[in-house]
Amino acid sequence: MTQEIQPVRGMNDVLPAEIGAWQTIEGVARELLAAYGYQEIRIPVVERTELFKRAIGEYTDVVEKEMYTFVDLGGDSLTLRPEATAGVMRALISNGMLRGQRHKLWCTGPMFRHEKPQKGRYRQFHQINVEAVGMPGPDVDVELIALTARLWRRLGIERVRLEVNSLGTPEARRAYRERLVEYFQARHERLDDDSRRRLEGNPLRILDSKNPDMRELIDGAPVLTEHLDPESRDHFQALRCALDELDIPFRVNPRLVRGLDYYSRTVFEWITDALGAQDAVCSGGRYDGLIAQLGGEATPGIGFAMGVERLVALLTQTGRVQPSPAADVYIVVSGSRAMASGVTLAERLRNELPNRRFELNLGGGNFKAQFRRADRSGAAIALILGDDELERGVASLKPLRREAGQSESPLPTLAAAIEAALAGPAGQP
RNA sequence: GUGGACGUAGCUCAGCUGGUAGAGUCCCGGGUUGUGAUCCCGGUUGUCGUGGGUUCGAGUCCCAUCGUCCACCCCA
Protein backbone atom coordinates (compact mmCIF):
# COMPACT_ATOMS: atom_id res chain seq x y z
CA MET A 1 0.00 0.00 0.00
CA THR A 2 1.18 3.51 -0.72
CA GLN A 3 1.77 5.88 2.11
CA GLU A 4 -1.47 7.58 3.04
CA ILE A 5 -1.62 11.34 3.05
CA GLN A 6 -2.33 12.96 6.38
CA PRO A 7 -4.84 15.73 6.80
CA VAL A 8 -3.51 19.15 7.74
CA ARG A 9 -3.32 19.62 11.47
CA GLY A 10 -6.28 21.45 12.94
CA MET A 11 -8.31 21.22 9.74
CA ASN A 12 -11.23 18.87 10.08
CA ASP A 13 -13.62 17.03 7.84
CA VAL A 14 -17.29 17.48 8.64
CA LEU A 15 -18.71 14.02 8.17
CA PRO A 16 -22.27 13.08 7.18
CA ALA A 17 -22.96 12.05 10.77
CA GLU A 18 -22.39 15.63 11.98
CA ILE A 19 -23.67 17.54 8.99
CA GLY A 20 -27.21 17.70 10.40
CA ALA A 21 -26.13 20.01 13.21
CA TRP A 22 -24.27 22.24 10.75
CA GLN A 23 -27.23 22.49 8.42
CA THR A 24 -29.60 23.19 11.29
CA ILE A 25 -27.45 26.07 12.51
CA GLU A 26 -26.88 27.49 9.06
CA GLY A 27 -30.54 27.10 8.12
CA VAL A 28 -31.94 28.72 11.26
CA ALA A 29 -29.40 31.54 11.06
CA ARG A 30 -30.13 32.15 7.38
CA GLU A 31 -33.87 32.32 8.06
CA LEU A 32 -33.52 34.59 11.07
CA LEU A 33 -31.09 36.97 9.39
CA ALA A 34 -33.42 37.32 6.43
CA ALA A 35 -36.26 38.05 8.85
CA TYR A 36 -34.20 40.88 10.38
CA GLY A 37 -33.40 42.29 6.94
CA TYR A 38 -29.81 41.15 6.57
CA GLN A 39 -28.42 40.24 3.16
CA GLU A 40 -25.77 37.70 2.42
CA ILE A 41 -22.44 38.77 1.00
CA ARG A 42 -19.68 36.46 -0.22
CA ILE A 43 -16.11 37.59 -0.14
CA PRO A 44 -12.77 35.94 -0.89
CA VAL A 45 -11.02 33.72 1.59
CA VAL A 46 -7.72 35.36 0.64
CA GLU A 47 -6.92 39.04 1.02
CA ARG A 48 -3.78 41.15 0.91
CA THR A 49 -1.85 40.73 4.15
CA GLU A 50 -1.87 44.49 4.63
CA LEU A 51 -5.65 44.51 5.10
CA PHE A 52 -5.50 42.37 8.23
CA LYS A 53 -2.48 44.17 9.60
CA ARG A 54 -4.27 47.47 9.33
CA ALA A 55 -7.69 46.29 10.49
CA ILE A 56 -6.85 43.89 13.29
CA GLY A 57 -3.75 45.64 14.54
CA GLU A 58 -0.06 45.02 13.98
CA TYR A 59 0.59 44.00 17.60
CA THR A 60 -2.25 41.58 18.18
CA ASP A 61 -1.58 37.87 18.59
CA VAL A 62 -3.59 37.12 15.47
CA VAL A 63 -1.42 39.28 13.25
CA GLU A 64 1.85 38.64 15.01
CA LYS A 65 1.86 34.89 15.02
CA GLU A 66 -1.32 33.24 13.80
CA MET A 67 -1.77 34.19 10.16
CA TYR A 68 -1.41 31.88 7.20
CA THR A 69 0.58 34.24 5.02
CA PHE A 70 2.29 33.45 1.73
CA VAL A 71 3.74 35.18 -1.27
CA ASP A 72 1.85 34.37 -4.46
CA LEU A 73 3.38 33.91 -7.91
CA GLY A 74 3.02 37.60 -8.63
CA GLY A 75 5.06 38.47 -5.55
CA ASP A 76 2.17 39.82 -3.45
CA SER A 77 1.90 38.96 0.24
CA LEU A 78 -1.49 37.35 0.74
CA THR A 79 -3.17 35.90 3.82
CA LEU A 80 -5.93 33.37 4.45
CA ARG A 81 -8.49 35.39 6.35
CA PRO A 82 -8.27 35.00 10.15
CA GLU A 83 -11.62 36.80 10.52
CA ALA A 84 -14.27 38.21 8.24
CA THR A 85 -15.03 41.78 9.25
CA ALA A 86 -11.95 43.27 7.60
CA GLY A 87 -12.80 41.61 4.30
CA VAL A 88 -16.44 42.70 4.38
CA MET A 89 -15.44 46.31 5.06
CA ARG A 90 -12.88 46.13 2.27
CA ALA A 91 -15.61 44.83 -0.05
CA LEU A 92 -17.88 47.77 0.83
CA ILE A 93 -15.06 50.21 0.10
CA SER A 94 -13.91 48.43 -3.08
CA ASN A 95 -17.41 48.39 -4.52
CA GLY A 96 -18.25 51.98 -3.66
CA MET A 97 -21.07 50.99 -1.33
CA LEU A 98 -20.52 53.58 1.36
CA ARG A 99 -21.29 57.29 0.70
CA GLY A 100 -23.68 57.52 3.61
CA GLN A 101 -25.42 54.30 2.73
CA ARG A 102 -26.40 51.69 5.26
CA HIS A 103 -25.81 48.01 4.98
CA LYS A 104 -27.00 45.03 6.97
CA LEU A 105 -24.92 42.08 5.87
CA TRP A 106 -23.95 38.61 6.89
CA CYS A 107 -21.56 36.02 5.59
CA THR A 108 -20.26 32.62 6.52
CA GLY A 109 -17.28 30.48 5.70
CA PRO A 110 -13.93 29.22 6.90
CA MET A 111 -11.34 31.28 8.77
CA PHE A 112 -7.73 30.33 9.38
CA ARG A 113 -5.50 30.83 12.37
CA HIS A 114 -2.29 28.98 13.06
CA GLU A 115 -2.92 28.12 16.71
CA LYS A 116 -2.40 24.91 18.58
CA PRO A 117 -5.61 22.92 18.13
CA GLN A 118 -7.74 22.21 21.15
CA LYS A 119 -11.34 21.46 21.93
CA GLY A 120 -13.41 24.08 20.10
CA ARG A 121 -10.34 25.64 18.55
CA TYR A 122 -9.10 24.68 15.11
CA ARG A 123 -6.79 26.05 12.46
CA GLN A 124 -9.59 26.09 9.94
CA PHE A 125 -12.80 27.03 11.67
CA HIS A 126 -16.09 28.49 10.54
CA GLN A 127 -17.90 31.61 11.49
CA ILE A 128 -21.21 33.21 10.77
CA ASN A 129 -20.56 36.94 10.64
CA VAL A 130 -23.11 39.71 10.87
CA GLU A 131 -22.26 43.33 10.15
CA ALA A 132 -24.40 46.49 10.34
CA VAL A 133 -22.75 49.51 8.75
CA GLY A 134 -23.82 53.15 8.73
CA MET A 135 -25.80 53.23 11.97
CA PRO A 136 -24.24 54.74 15.09
CA GLY A 137 -26.42 52.87 17.57
CA PRO A 138 -27.25 52.05 20.25
CA ASP A 139 -30.52 50.88 18.68
CA VAL A 140 -28.73 48.62 16.22
CA ASP A 141 -26.47 47.31 19.01
CA VAL A 142 -29.54 46.20 20.89
CA GLU A 143 -31.20 44.66 17.87
CA LEU A 144 -28.14 42.62 17.05
CA ILE A 145 -27.97 41.23 20.55
CA ALA A 146 -31.69 40.49 20.45
CA LEU A 147 -31.12 38.64 17.19
CA THR A 148 -28.51 36.40 18.79
CA ALA A 149 -30.71 35.76 21.80
CA ARG A 150 -33.50 34.70 19.47
CA LEU A 151 -31.12 32.45 17.58
CA TRP A 152 -30.24 30.55 20.77
CA ARG A 153 -33.93 30.17 21.55
CA ARG A 154 -34.69 28.81 18.08
CA LEU A 155 -31.81 26.39 18.28
CA GLY A 156 -32.70 25.30 21.79
CA ILE A 157 -29.29 26.29 23.13
CA GLU A 158 -29.56 27.22 26.81
CA ARG A 159 -26.13 27.10 28.34
CA VAL A 160 -25.05 30.56 27.23
CA ARG A 161 -25.02 33.90 29.02
CA LEU A 162 -24.39 37.40 27.85
CA GLU A 163 -21.65 39.76 28.93
CA VAL A 164 -21.43 43.36 27.76
CA ASN A 165 -19.02 46.20 28.17
CA SER A 166 -18.15 49.52 26.64
CA LEU A 167 -14.67 50.44 25.52
CA GLY A 168 -15.56 54.07 24.88
CA THR A 169 -14.10 56.05 22.04
CA PRO A 170 -10.55 55.29 20.94
CA GLU A 171 -9.48 58.52 22.69
CA ALA A 172 -11.11 57.61 25.97
CA ARG A 173 -9.69 54.14 25.71
CA ARG A 174 -6.21 55.50 25.10
CA ALA A 175 -6.46 57.73 28.15
CA TYR A 176 -7.70 54.86 30.27
CA ARG A 177 -4.95 52.66 28.97
CA GLU A 178 -2.38 55.18 30.13
CA ARG A 179 -3.86 55.24 33.62
CA LEU A 180 -3.83 51.49 33.70
CA VAL A 181 -0.22 51.26 32.64
CA GLU A 182 0.66 53.80 35.34
CA TYR A 183 -1.18 51.74 37.94
CA PHE A 184 0.51 48.48 37.03
CA GLN A 185 3.91 50.02 36.49
CA ALA A 186 3.80 51.37 40.01
CA ARG A 187 3.15 47.80 41.18
CA HIS A 188 5.44 46.11 38.72
CA GLU A 189 6.93 43.83 41.39
CA ARG A 190 3.58 42.13 41.96
CA LEU A 191 2.90 41.31 38.33
CA ASP A 192 3.41 37.78 37.04
CA ASP A 193 5.42 37.06 33.89
CA ASP A 194 2.38 36.97 31.61
CA SER A 195 1.14 40.29 32.88
CA ARG A 196 4.53 41.96 32.52
CA ARG A 197 4.56 40.89 28.93
CA ARG A 198 1.04 42.22 28.41
CA LEU A 199 1.98 45.53 30.01
CA GLU A 200 4.04 46.21 26.90
CA GLY A 201 1.62 44.96 24.24
CA ASN A 202 -1.94 44.93 25.50
CA PRO A 203 -2.25 46.16 29.09
CA LEU A 204 -6.04 45.82 29.08
CA ARG A 205 -5.65 42.08 28.92
CA ILE A 206 -3.94 42.02 32.32
CA LEU A 207 -7.42 42.57 33.71
CA ASP A 208 -8.39 39.22 32.20
CA SER A 209 -5.67 37.24 33.99
CA LYS A 210 -6.73 33.88 35.35
CA ASN A 211 -3.96 33.84 37.91
CA PRO A 212 -5.66 33.98 41.37
CA ASP A 213 -2.58 35.68 42.84
CA MET A 214 -3.28 38.63 40.60
CA ARG A 215 -6.87 39.00 41.70
CA GLU A 216 -6.34 41.53 44.45
CA LEU A 217 -4.09 43.69 42.33
CA ILE A 218 -6.58 43.64 39.48
CA ASP A 219 -9.51 44.43 41.73
CA GLY A 220 -7.77 47.61 42.77
CA ALA A 221 -7.09 48.75 39.21
CA PRO A 222 -8.99 51.62 37.59
CA VAL A 223 -12.20 50.43 35.95
CA LEU A 224 -12.78 51.14 32.29
CA THR A 225 -16.48 51.86 32.56
CA GLU A 226 -15.73 54.61 35.06
CA HIS A 227 -13.44 56.36 32.61
CA LEU A 228 -15.77 56.53 29.63
CA ASP A 229 -16.34 59.72 27.72
CA PRO A 230 -19.83 61.15 28.35
CA GLU A 231 -21.25 60.12 24.99
CA SER A 232 -20.08 56.56 25.31
CA ARG A 233 -21.48 56.47 28.81
CA ASP A 234 -24.91 57.51 27.51
CA HIS A 235 -24.65 55.02 24.67
CA PHE A 236 -23.84 52.23 27.10
CA GLN A 237 -26.59 53.32 29.46
CA ALA A 238 -29.14 53.22 26.64
CA LEU A 239 -27.97 49.78 25.62
CA ARG A 240 -28.41 48.37 29.10
CA CYS A 241 -31.87 49.90 29.50
CA ALA A 242 -32.99 48.42 26.20
CA LEU A 243 -31.71 44.99 27.13
CA ASP A 244 -33.63 45.18 30.40
CA GLU A 245 -36.67 46.28 28.47
CA LEU A 246 -36.36 43.20 26.28
CA ASP A 247 -35.80 40.90 29.25
CA ILE A 248 -32.45 39.80 27.94
CA PRO A 249 -30.33 39.04 31.00
CA PHE A 250 -26.74 40.25 30.89
CA ARG A 251 -23.78 40.95 33.08
CA VAL A 252 -21.57 43.99 32.71
CA ASN A 253 -18.04 42.69 32.59
CA PRO A 254 -15.64 45.62 32.86
CA ARG A 255 -12.81 43.24 31.98
CA LEU A 256 -14.34 42.27 28.67
CA VAL A 257 -11.91 43.70 26.14
CA ARG A 258 -11.75 42.27 22.68
CA GLY A 259 -8.59 40.90 21.19
CA LEU A 260 -8.80 42.88 18.01
CA ASP A 261 -7.81 46.54 17.98
CA TYR A 262 -10.70 47.91 15.95
CA TYR A 263 -13.42 47.74 18.59
CA SER A 264 -14.89 50.81 20.25
CA ARG A 265 -17.85 51.43 22.56
CA THR A 266 -20.17 48.43 22.72
CA VAL A 267 -18.59 45.01 22.98
CA PHE A 268 -20.41 41.82 23.90
CA GLU A 269 -19.81 38.15 24.20
CA TRP A 270 -21.99 35.10 24.67
CA ILE A 271 -20.12 32.60 26.78
CA THR A 272 -20.79 29.04 27.85
CA ASP A 273 -19.56 26.71 30.57
CA ALA A 274 -20.09 23.67 28.37
CA LEU A 275 -17.05 23.74 26.12
CA GLY A 276 -14.05 23.64 28.40
CA ALA A 277 -11.53 26.40 27.97
CA GLN A 278 -13.09 27.81 24.83
CA ASP A 279 -16.02 29.63 26.34
CA ALA A 280 -16.79 32.27 23.73
CA VAL A 281 -19.55 31.18 21.38
CA CYS A 282 -20.37 34.51 19.82
CA SER A 283 -18.72 37.82 20.24
CA GLY A 284 -18.54 41.17 18.64
CA GLY A 285 -18.79 44.86 19.06
CA ARG A 286 -18.80 48.26 17.53
CA TYR A 287 -15.98 49.32 15.20
CA ASP A 288 -16.70 52.97 14.43
CA GLY A 289 -13.18 53.81 13.32
CA LEU A 290 -12.42 50.78 11.20
CA ILE A 291 -13.70 51.84 7.80
CA ALA A 292 -11.85 55.14 7.90
CA GLN A 293 -8.75 53.27 8.98
CA LEU A 294 -9.07 51.16 5.85
CA GLY A 295 -9.30 54.19 3.62
CA GLY A 296 -13.07 54.40 3.30
CA GLU A 297 -15.35 57.28 4.17
CA ALA A 298 -15.73 57.39 7.96
CA THR A 299 -18.74 55.20 8.73
CA PRO A 300 -19.80 53.63 12.02
CA GLY A 301 -20.34 49.90 12.19
CA ILE A 302 -21.05 47.00 14.51
CA GLY A 303 -20.83 43.29 14.03
CA PHE A 304 -20.28 39.95 15.61
CA ALA A 305 -19.02 36.49 14.79
CA MET A 306 -20.35 33.12 15.88
CA GLY A 307 -18.06 30.11 15.99
CA VAL A 308 -19.91 27.43 14.08
CA GLU A 309 -17.89 24.49 15.47
CA ARG A 310 -18.64 25.69 18.99
CA LEU A 311 -22.34 26.08 18.22
CA VAL A 312 -22.36 22.62 16.69
CA ALA A 313 -20.86 21.26 19.91
CA LEU A 314 -23.50 23.03 22.02
CA LEU A 315 -26.34 21.96 19.78
CA THR A 316 -25.12 18.37 19.75
CA GLN A 317 -25.02 18.41 23.55
CA THR A 318 -28.69 19.33 23.69
CA GLY A 319 -29.47 16.10 21.84
CA ARG A 320 -32.00 17.88 19.67
CA VAL A 321 -30.21 17.38 16.39
CA GLN A 322 -32.38 15.53 13.95
CA PRO A 323 -30.72 12.82 11.91
CA SER A 324 -30.82 13.35 8.18
CA PRO A 325 -34.10 12.08 6.80
CA ALA A 326 -34.20 8.47 5.67
CA ALA A 327 -35.51 7.28 2.35
CA ASP A 328 -39.21 6.65 2.02
CA VAL A 329 -38.77 3.68 -0.27
CA TYR A 330 -35.84 1.33 -0.74
CA ILE A 331 -36.02 -0.55 -4.03
CA VAL A 332 -34.86 -4.14 -3.91
CA VAL A 333 -34.15 -5.71 -7.28
CA SER A 334 -33.70 -9.42 -7.85
CA GLY A 335 -32.84 -11.22 -11.05
CA SER A 336 -31.00 -9.97 -14.10
CA ARG A 337 -34.01 -8.50 -15.89
CA ALA A 338 -35.32 -6.77 -12.78
CA MET A 339 -31.88 -5.37 -11.99
CA ALA A 340 -31.69 -3.94 -15.50
CA SER A 341 -35.07 -2.26 -15.23
CA GLY A 342 -34.54 -1.00 -11.65
CA VAL A 343 -33.14 2.38 -12.71
CA THR A 344 -35.96 2.95 -15.16
CA LEU A 345 -38.59 2.17 -12.55
CA ALA A 346 -36.88 4.34 -9.91
CA GLU A 347 -36.63 7.29 -12.31
CA ARG A 348 -40.28 6.90 -13.27
CA LEU A 349 -41.32 6.91 -9.61
CA ARG A 350 -39.15 9.97 -8.95
CA ASN A 351 -41.02 11.73 -11.77
CA GLU A 352 -44.39 10.73 -10.39
CA LEU A 353 -43.65 11.40 -6.72
CA PRO A 354 -41.07 14.19 -6.73
CA ASN A 355 -41.33 14.80 -3.00
CA ARG A 356 -40.66 11.21 -2.00
CA ARG A 357 -37.18 9.87 -1.41
CA PHE A 358 -36.36 6.71 -3.32
CA GLU A 359 -33.21 4.73 -2.79
CA LEU A 360 -32.45 2.12 -5.39
CA ASN A 361 -30.27 -0.80 -4.42
CA LEU A 362 -27.03 -0.30 -6.32
CA GLY A 363 -24.08 -2.58 -6.72
CA GLY A 364 -25.96 -5.86 -6.68
CA GLY A 365 -26.04 -8.08 -3.63
CA ASN A 366 -28.22 -11.03 -2.84
CA PHE A 367 -31.73 -10.74 -1.56
CA LYS A 368 -30.80 -10.98 2.09
CA ALA A 369 -28.09 -8.34 1.74
CA GLN A 370 -30.44 -6.00 -0.11
CA PHE A 371 -33.06 -6.33 2.60
CA ARG A 372 -30.44 -5.70 5.24
CA ARG A 373 -29.47 -2.50 3.43
CA ALA A 374 -33.13 -1.55 3.11
CA ASP A 375 -33.50 -1.92 6.85
CA ARG A 376 -30.30 -0.03 7.70
CA SER A 377 -31.26 2.78 5.35
CA GLY A 378 -34.19 3.53 7.62
CA ALA A 379 -36.62 3.45 4.70
CA ALA A 380 -40.29 3.13 5.59
CA ILE A 381 -41.07 0.52 3.00
CA ALA A 382 -39.22 -1.84 0.71
CA LEU A 383 -40.30 -2.05 -2.90
CA ILE A 384 -39.50 -5.43 -4.35
CA LEU A 385 -38.99 -5.92 -8.04
CA GLY A 386 -37.97 -9.41 -9.13
CA ASP A 387 -38.06 -11.18 -12.43
CA ASP A 388 -41.12 -12.93 -11.09
CA GLU A 389 -42.96 -9.63 -10.45
CA LEU A 390 -41.76 -8.20 -13.72
CA GLU A 391 -43.25 -11.18 -15.53
CA ARG A 392 -46.64 -10.44 -13.99
CA GLY A 393 -46.40 -6.64 -14.36
CA VAL A 394 -46.47 -5.96 -10.60
CA ALA A 395 -44.18 -4.93 -7.74
CA SER A 396 -44.39 -5.90 -4.06
CA LEU A 397 -44.47 -3.43 -1.19
CA LYS A 398 -43.39 -4.40 2.30
CA PRO A 399 -43.58 -2.01 5.26
CA LEU A 400 -40.37 -2.18 7.30
CA ARG A 401 -41.33 -0.04 10.27
CA ARG A 402 -44.60 -1.58 11.35
CA GLU A 403 -46.22 -4.96 11.45
CA ALA A 404 -48.21 -5.17 8.28
CA GLY A 405 -48.46 -7.59 5.46
CA GLN A 406 -46.75 -7.37 2.14
CA SER A 407 -48.89 -6.30 -0.78
CA GLU A 408 -48.67 -6.28 -4.54
CA SER A 409 -49.51 -3.52 -6.94
CA PRO A 410 -49.71 -3.38 -10.72
CA LEU A 411 -46.83 -1.33 -12.12
CA PRO A 412 -49.01 1.36 -13.77
CA THR A 413 -50.65 2.33 -10.44
CA LEU A 414 -47.54 1.85 -8.30
CA ALA A 415 -47.23 5.50 -7.31
CA ALA A 416 -50.69 5.51 -5.74
CA ALA A 417 -49.97 2.25 -3.96
CA ILE A 418 -46.74 3.67 -2.53
CA GLU A 419 -48.56 6.74 -1.22
CA ALA A 420 -51.18 4.52 0.37
CA ALA A 421 -48.53 2.32 1.97
CA LEU A 422 -46.63 5.33 3.28
CA ALA A 423 -49.82 6.80 4.70
CA GLY A 424 -50.42 3.59 6.62
CA PRO A 425 -53.60 1.62 7.16
CA ALA A 426 -55.36 4.26 9.29
CA GLY A 427 -53.77 7.26 7.70
CA GLN A 428 -50.91 7.06 10.18
CA PRO A 429 -47.47 7.79 8.79
C1' G B 1 4.95 28.93 21.39
C1' U B 2 4.79 26.16 26.78
C1' G B 3 3.14 21.92 29.81
C1' G B 4 0.58 17.06 30.63
C1' A B 5 -1.94 12.45 28.98
C1' C B 6 -2.46 9.15 25.02
C1' G B 7 -1.48 6.56 19.74
C1' U B 8 -2.88 -1.76 19.08
C1' A B 9 -8.21 -4.33 13.26
C1' G B 10 -12.74 0.48 9.59
C1' C B 11 -14.81 1.72 14.88
C1' U B 12 -14.62 0.94 20.64
C1' C B 13 -10.92 -1.23 23.39
C1' A B 14 -7.92 -5.64 26.08
C1' G B 15 -2.82 -7.22 25.96
C1' C B 16 0.33 -8.55 33.76
C1' U B 17 7.16 -7.93 35.74
C1' G B 18 9.94 -7.80 27.61
C1' G B 19 8.83 -14.31 24.77
C1' U B 20 6.84 -12.43 17.29
C1' A B 21 -1.23 -10.07 18.74
C1' G B 22 -6.96 -10.69 20.98
C1' A B 23 -12.46 -9.33 22.13
C1' G B 24 -16.75 -6.75 20.76
C1' U B 25 -18.72 -4.19 16.70
C1' C B 26 -18.93 -3.35 11.46
C1' C B 27 -18.67 -5.80 6.75
C1' C B 28 -19.30 -10.49 3.85
C1' G B 29 -21.32 -15.59 3.39
C1' G B 30 -24.49 -19.50 5.27
C1' G B 31 -28.76 -21.41 8.48
C1' U B 32 -34.03 -19.45 5.35
C1' U B 33 -32.45 -21.74 -3.50
C1' G B 34 -36.92 -14.29 -2.88
C1' U B 35 -37.59 -11.22 2.77
C1' G B 36 -34.53 -6.98 7.05
C1' A B 37 -33.97 -5.64 12.31
C1' U B 38 -33.45 -10.64 16.64
C1' C B 39 -30.86 -15.59 16.99
C1' C B 40 -27.06 -19.41 15.49
C1' C B 41 -22.57 -20.84 12.49
C1' G B 42 -18.40 -19.38 9.54
C1' G B 43 -14.96 -15.75 7.15
C1' U B 44 -11.73 -11.21 5.91
C1' U B 45 -9.15 -7.33 8.31
C1' G B 46 -3.14 -5.25 11.73
C1' U B 47 3.83 -1.64 8.50
C1' C B 48 1.06 -2.56 17.20
C1' G B 49 1.57 6.04 14.61
C1' U B 50 6.74 6.59 12.31
C1' G B 51 12.18 6.26 12.74
C1' G B 52 16.21 4.90 15.62
C1' G B 53 18.32 2.44 20.10
C1' U B 54 18.81 -1.40 24.26
C1' U B 55 18.09 -6.89 24.06
C1' C B 56 19.02 -13.60 22.03
C1' G B 57 14.04 -11.45 21.58
C1' A B 58 10.25 -5.05 21.92
C1' G B 59 3.07 -3.79 21.34
C1' U B 60 5.65 -3.84 26.20
C1' C B 61 11.93 -0.42 28.03
C1' C B 62 14.82 4.29 26.14
C1' C B 63 15.30 8.50 22.58
C1' A B 64 13.48 11.30 18.64
C1' U B 65 9.54 12.56 15.48
C1' C B 66 4.42 12.97 13.80
C1' G B 67 -0.59 12.95 15.36
C1' U B 68 -4.86 13.23 18.86
C1' C B 69 -6.82 15.08 23.36
C1' C B 70 -6.55 18.46 27.62
C1' A B 71 -4.69 22.89 29.89
C1' C B 72 -1.72 27.62 29.47
C1' C B 73 -1.28 31.68 25.91
C1' C B 74 -4.95 33.60 22.75
C1' C B 75 -9.62 33.35 20.71
C1' A B 76 -15.02 32.01 17.39
Image: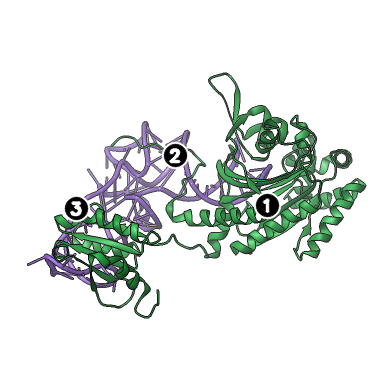
Q: Residue A340 carries which label?
A: 3
Task: Using the image as rendered, state which of residue A320 and residue A429 is in the foreground.
Answer: A429
Q: Residue furthest right?
A: A230
Q: Give how far across and how far down residue A85 sits, in percent.
A: 68, 40
Q: Which quadrant is home to the C terminus of chain A?
A: bottom left
On what subunit does the disc labeled 3 rest?
A
Nearer the observer: mark 3 or 2; the answer is: 3
Q: Is residue A360 visible?
A: no
Q: Give how far across and how far down residue A168 sits, in percent.
A: 85, 45
For the residues tagged 1 and 3, is the chain the same?
Answer: yes
Nearer the observer: mark 2 or 1; the answer is: 1
Q: Residue A7 carries which label?
A: 2
Label 1 vs 3, first from the N-terminus: 1
Q: Give how far across and how far down residue A164 sits, in percent.
A: 77, 54
Q: Which amino acid does label 3 sit on?
A: Ala
Question: Element type at marker 3?
Answer: helix
Residue at (33, 76) in percent of width and height: A402
* Disc 1: which residue: A37
Task: Bin the neighbour count of mark 2 within 10 Å (Cα to Cα): few under 14, some 14-19, many 20 and up.
Answer: few
Specify whether A71 is left or right of A246. Answer: left
Quadrant of res A68? top right
Q: Can residue A266 be seen in this view?
A: yes
- Colour scheme used in the picture? by chain
Specify whether B14 is left or right of A237. Answer: left
Question: Element type at marker 2?
Answer: loop
Colour for chain A in the figure? green
Q: Which amino acid does label 2 sit on?
A: Pro
Task: Bin the neighbour count of mark 1 within 10 Å (Cα to Cα): few under 14, some 14-19, many 20 and up.
Answer: few
Q: What residue type is labelled 1?
A: Gly
For the residues tagged 2 and 1, is the chain the same?
Answer: yes
Which chain is drawn using purple?
B
Q: Tell me: residue A180, above or below residue A332.
A: above
